[in-house]
Image (cartoon, rainbow, N blue to C red):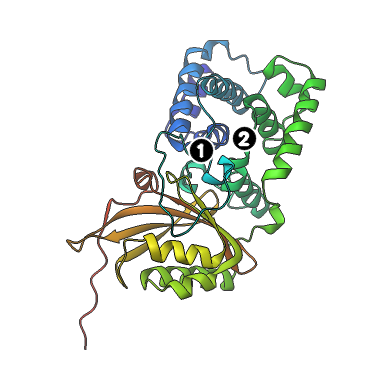
Amino acid sequence: MTDQITEDFLGPNDPYRGELLAHCYRMLGSVHDAEDLVQETYLRAWKAMDKFEGRSSMRTWLYRIATNVCLTALESRSKRPLPTGLGAPSSDPVGELVQSPEVPWLEPVPDAMVGTGDPADPASIVTSRESIRLAFVAALQHLPPRQRAVLILRDVLKWRAAEVAELLNTTTVAVNSTLQRARAQLDQMAPSEDDVVEPTTPDQRELLEQYVAAFENYDIAAMVELFTKDAIWEMPPFTGWYQGAETIGRLISTNCPAQGPGDMLMVETQANGQPAFGLYMRGEDGVHRAFQLQVLTMQGGRVAHVGSFFDTDLFAKFGLPEVYSAPPQPLPV
């Protein structure tokens, strides 16, 4: 039996890796850290396989190990914020851009790595996406580690309070009290799920196409029209954040190295259950290289938030090349 269990969860058809990666990502806010901690989870599980008595499911057992691995890791790690989480007001779009590379910034996660629910169950897909939204994960990072674990286990994974209490070696009363505090803090920071729009309707798809066209044509006026009035743009490792469609337009026109149409290419992907784009910038040699990864939040037919990540090491996680070669254009007839 042990050999069969080992083959099931450590073999090529491992059904748990994606959801464990999502769990560790919610806890740590980093796709790189999450991958390392999933590996640590499996290593500990492998060493303790002879102690698995089957009183709980294999899935529950692995989540117990992964949660403890994450809590141990968080003892020596700082929270991962976005610039909006640093407490400073909106920045001047024509002011100096200040980098802080020493801050362990929140990272996006590819949908392909964490999965987005059971394809046969639309409700499962929506729930899965909501639990890895960039704003939700960013809000989680401001909770103390044990509050973070309790909220994820109870509200995302739907564990019973008694199960969480056993894992954390505490009481159900303490778990329920911790959950109440975590929910109260999260309500102040994370947007309502009802505000988030799924990019599945024809209108939303058209919006994304217009967004790509505006950037690839370097059309600042068109960009401004696509943002909500109070939209937010933030771009780690730069510490500033920018609010308002016109402000974002001035930021891009002032600081973007693009000079005109064709300098930027946008390649669509999916991050955190949201539409995302790898942006490639053309250099003086005419080659388009990885520049930034944009994760979009859409509300009311407009773009309400863009997390623009300048860590180009993330491109590989999304299966995006460092250098983008556009397909050859057909010859004129």
- Above-or-below relation of 211 to 44: below
Query: Label 1 is placed on what type of residue?
Result: Gly
- 38 relative position to 129: left or right: left
Q: Earlier in the sequence, mark 1 or mark 2?
A: 1
Q: Position of residue 9 (x, y in %)?
A: 50, 28
Query: Label 2 is placed on what type of residue?
Result: His
- Above-or-below relation of 227 to 239: below
Residue extending farthest to the left is 285
Give the residue number, with chain letter if any, for mark 1. Answer: 18
Residues under numbered marks 1 and 2 in contact, where contact means CB atoms less than 8 Å apart? no
Q: Residue at x 65, y 55 (%)?
A: 122
| Residue 207 visible, this orientation | yes
Residue extending farthest to the bottom is 333
How far apart marks 1 and 2 lie (CA) works out to 24 Å
Give the residue number, with chain letter if any, for mark 2. Answer: 142
| Element assignment for label 2 | loop
